[in-house]
Image (spheres, rainbow, N blue to C red):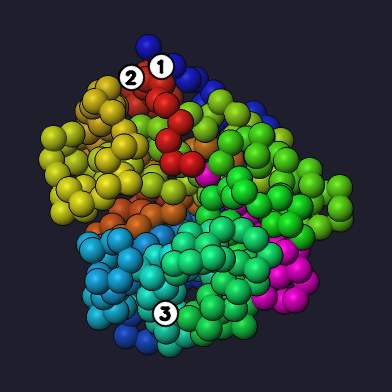
Amino acid sequence: MAALRMGRHHVVGGCGATVRGRPNSWFPGAPPRPEGKQEYMQYVKLGATGLDVSRICLGCMSFGIPDRGTHRWSLDEEASRPLIRRALDAGINFFDTANVYSDGTSEEIVGRVLAEHARRDEIVLATKVHGRMRPGPNGGGLSRKAIMTEIDHSLRRLGTDYVDLYQIHRFDPVTPIEETMEALHEVVKAGKARYIGASSMYAWQFSKAQYTARLNGWTRFVSMQNHYNLLYREEEREMLPLCADQAVGTLPWSPLARGRLTRDWDETTERSRTDEFGKGLYQEGDRAVVEAVSAVAAQRGVPRAQVALAWLLRQNTVAAPIVGVTKPQHIDDAVAALDVDLTDKDVQSLEESYRPHPVRGH
């Protein structure tokens, strides 16, 4: 029996009308798309803004020098380049990275490749701030000093004058929310960011931040990057209804549950064996959901990743799942998921084995 059954939230506000975009021909010499894939990417307004984002966001945590930071499975620039280019060719215009990914080298790689192969006015470039970038005082967090310092470092690494979406990577419990929100407002007013967004936190914390900004006439968050997938649906209790009510677009991270939704439960990968953060996110009871995904995928004759992403794309608050990739097929599956129309019976099969989880990912 499913523990949660909110399904598609009845209040629409996190995601605007879907529109068709340009053909997949963003740069000369683009690799051909596999036969049968859709010709056009879909775009949607991010929350209540007028900003057009592709319905698939490319997560860039996979890109970075392996010996820097904590992601030894990340891809260096040579291996990252063709994947970023393939995403562009697929019509993806939304790219999400963070200052802390591979000690800043993800931002450097993404910035260089996009500068060479994309039109800056068309892409939506997002990065994040909060994680510790260096030892000692003021090396992380969301103080005014940290935010003002890190936005400049991120812009330098990305090679751009502004980011489209500047997100706080987590909530900072030791910095007054007034200090954080005012600093982010000043970043926007200085022209260094077009919009601001937040990431995993409790709904009361997000509500407090939005209320504080509104009370003082400061810029409010337009997006919430939260932990949400078929294995972890605790966000349906409070955060997603709040985002729907406040017209905040959601950008789920780990939409494939660290790859668990794409393979058999007992199968491991190099990342799953070394991903200490990911090891605590899921539980043995999730096996039944993984098996349900496998069954629906087999019935439809499509990869499991397409089924798992298609389920997320049905949720009205979801603007764009953030999909990390290490192989071209990962991009192809993400784009193909836009054409997978799950039936109500499929959805019931996918959801009915869900079991409650402790809060994870904050």
Look at mark 2 in the image and give the residue it sits on.
Answer: 353
**Mark earlier in primary sequence (3, 2):** 3
Give the magenta-colored segment's residue range: 183-200
Does the CB distance between marks 3 and 2 fall below 8 Å?
no
Q: Residues within 10 Å of mark 2 (few under 14, many from 20)?
A: many
Name the kind of residue labelled 3 in the image. Answer: Glu
Q: Residue at x 49, y 20 (%)?
A: 5
- Secondary structure type for disc 1: loop
**Mark earlier in primary sequence (3, 1):** 1
Closest to the observer, 279 or 229: 279
Closest to the observer, 293 or 346: 293
Q: Is residue 316 above or below residue 124?
A: above
Closest to the observer, 145 or 305: 145
Q: Tag on residue 31?
A: none
- Secondary structure type for disc 3: helix
- Secondary structure type for disc 2: loop
Query: Left or right of 330: which side holds 316?
Result: right
Does the stretch in magenta take in 184? Answer: yes
Does the stretch in magenta take in 164? Answer: no
Look at mark 1 in the image and give the residue it sits on.
Answer: 2
Residue 251 in the image, given as x and y percentages of width and height: 52, 49
Q: Residues within 10 Å of mark 3 (few under 14, many from 20)?
A: many
View extreme (top): residue: 1
Q: Nearer the viewer, mark 3 or mark 1?
A: 3
Look at mark 3 in the image and give the residue it sits on.
Answer: 108
Q: Residues within 10 Å of mark 1 (few under 14, many from 20)?
A: few
Q: Residue at x 59, y 78 (%)?
A: 152
Q: Is residue 41 visible?
A: no
Query: Left or right of 19: which side holds 311?
Result: left
Residue 169 in the image, given as x and y percentages of width and height: 53, 55
